[in-house]
Image (cartoon, rainbow, N blue to C red):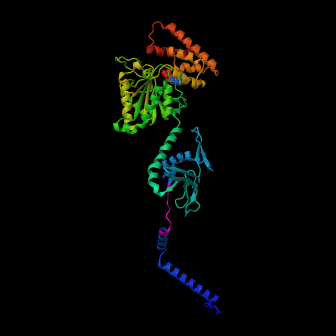
Amino acid sequence: MAARTFPEMPTPSSLLSAYASMSTSIMLFRTMFNQLFPRELRRYVLNAVRFYWKPKSSKLTLVFDEKDGLTANHMFEAAEAFLCTRINPDSERLRITKSVKENHINVKFADSETIADSFEGIQVSWTYVRQQPQQRPGGDGDTLDYASGNSSSGRGGFSPERKYIELKFDKKYRETIISSYLPLILQRSEQLQNQKKIVKLHNLQSYGGGPGHKESVNLDHPSTFDTLAMDPGMKKAIIDDLNLFLKRKEFYKRVGKAWKRGYLLYGPPGTGKSSLIAAIANYLKFDIFDLQLSNVGGDSSLKKLMLRTSNRSILVIEDIDCSIQLPDRKGTVLSKLPEVKSGRDPMFSLSGLLNFIDGLWSCCGDERIIIFTTNHKERLDPALLRPGRMDVHIHMSYLTVDGFETLAANYLNIHDYHWRFREIKELIKCKKVTPAEVAEELMKSDDVDVVLEGLVKFLKRKKMEDDESKDGVDDDDEESEVREAKKAKIIS
Ligand SMILES: Nc1ncnc2c1ncn2[C@@H]1O[C@H](COP(=O)(O)OP(=O)(O)OP(=O)(O)O)[C@@H](O)[C@H]1O
């Protein structure tokens, strides 16, 4: 068998000299390259190579910075509010906030947490990022104003803390996300803000208050449409009307009318006019501006007060017949201003007032509701009652059987039946009694049987007194209704 021959193996010294000459050539080439191509050109070429060779990402990231320059970025706030409703149950870190004025605790997602969401089948992921203040290059130990996040030096220094939210998704859904998902987030966050809104009661006074006088307080009135004792059909009609009003921004613009709605609430005292106003405010989350017309000196003072009201609010003028000079249908003045101070013009006509408010709100008012209340609808200027002036007239009447059931559920927690109900309902049907009177009877004890027995006695007594004093007085006379209800309120 012939012996196998191997090519001649390089010796270690020849390998070493080849390596040395190659290194020398590379160094020589590098030096020549550096000398021939300036640094900027080299960087440019390198970047170009990197750009074209880098694998392209299929993901797009949208960044919602907390601030847009010096102003708050509404999109950041909206995303933050929206994400509170999307927190994963297995989150490991959450932020908790609450301001003194808020009466609830906010649970928010914390830095570095990621939340997954989906929209029309598109998977997206949200990340909250908080960048600590960083020293800028060129800084030489400048101080940082932690309150404002500003550096005290113009050169270098610290960049302030930066908070932002990142939204990542597949690039091909860019249009859908920007034109549909983001508007949805804005809309949801508005709804959430609205739910949390604390309704305020503002007192519109032209003369200002004394020391310690508060112009606005939180409206703590618990009245809602659920707690209101009134005809269920009427309640539904009011809610539908409010909902329609809210939806009709474009409609009002199209027909060239101020986006406002006027309600006239009338009926005897104690039938729930104020409670209905509070229920409307709580339902819409609109602030209430209470205007005492008797305190208003004239047009200019009224204008100033009106300019203090805000959009999405209810302007309330209670007991309109007592606070303004009202000519009756024949033109004679029925009620006078309690006090006419010198220099003021007391001669407001309600129609004039409405014209004035219309004019003002057409140019600078949105989503406004105006509510007048009166115990004497028959005294109002007919011009005010014409269609188109006050859009809805609501008669708050005496307690009905349905209304009693609502009160029994609210005050006594009885939602179905009690053996006393039959007798009580019969008495309510044949005797005019206000919800306020019955509500007061229902609060007299914690014992349901004692309370209902007391109510039966009260209704019987009222019926007896009424039968005795009736003597030909017309029951339909609204004046007598009011007198009677007022008397009952004082006695109880
Ligand atoms: N319809 C109602 N439903 C529930 N509670 C009512 C109703 N009406 C009156 N009440 C009770 O009676 C109290 C007085 O009622 P409210 O002040 O709303 O009546 P009003 O019609 O505005 O009276 P006034 O004309 O004297 O201002 C309320 O705090 C509430 O507890």
Residue 173 image position (x, y, % from top left): 46, 55
> Most extreme residue toward the front, as rendered?
1
> Most extreme residue toward the bottom, as rendered?
2
At x 59%, y 50%, the residue is 110
Q: Nearer the viewer, residue 374 or 62?
A: 62
Residue 408 image position (x, y, % from top left): 57, 23
At x 54%, y 21%, the residue is 404
Answer whether residue 457 is magenta in the image.
Answer: no
Residue 438 image position (x, y, % from top left): 55, 19
371 left or right of 460 in image: left
At x 37%, y 32%, the residue is 358
Answer whether residue 55 is magenta in the image.
Answer: yes
Q: Quadrant of the C terminus?
A: top right
Residue 400 image position (x, y, % from top left): 50, 20
Let me know if residue 288 appears in the view: yes
Q: Quadrant of residue 139?
A: bottom right
Depicted 67 relative to depicted 104: above or below: below
Q: Nearer the viewer, residue 93 or 34?
A: 93
The span picked out in magenta is 52-62
Q: Quadrant of the N terminus?
A: bottom right
Q: Quadrant of residue 144?
A: bottom right
Q: Nearer the viewer, residue 5 or 172?
A: 5
Q: How many marks?
A: 0
Let me know if residue 206 appears in the view: no
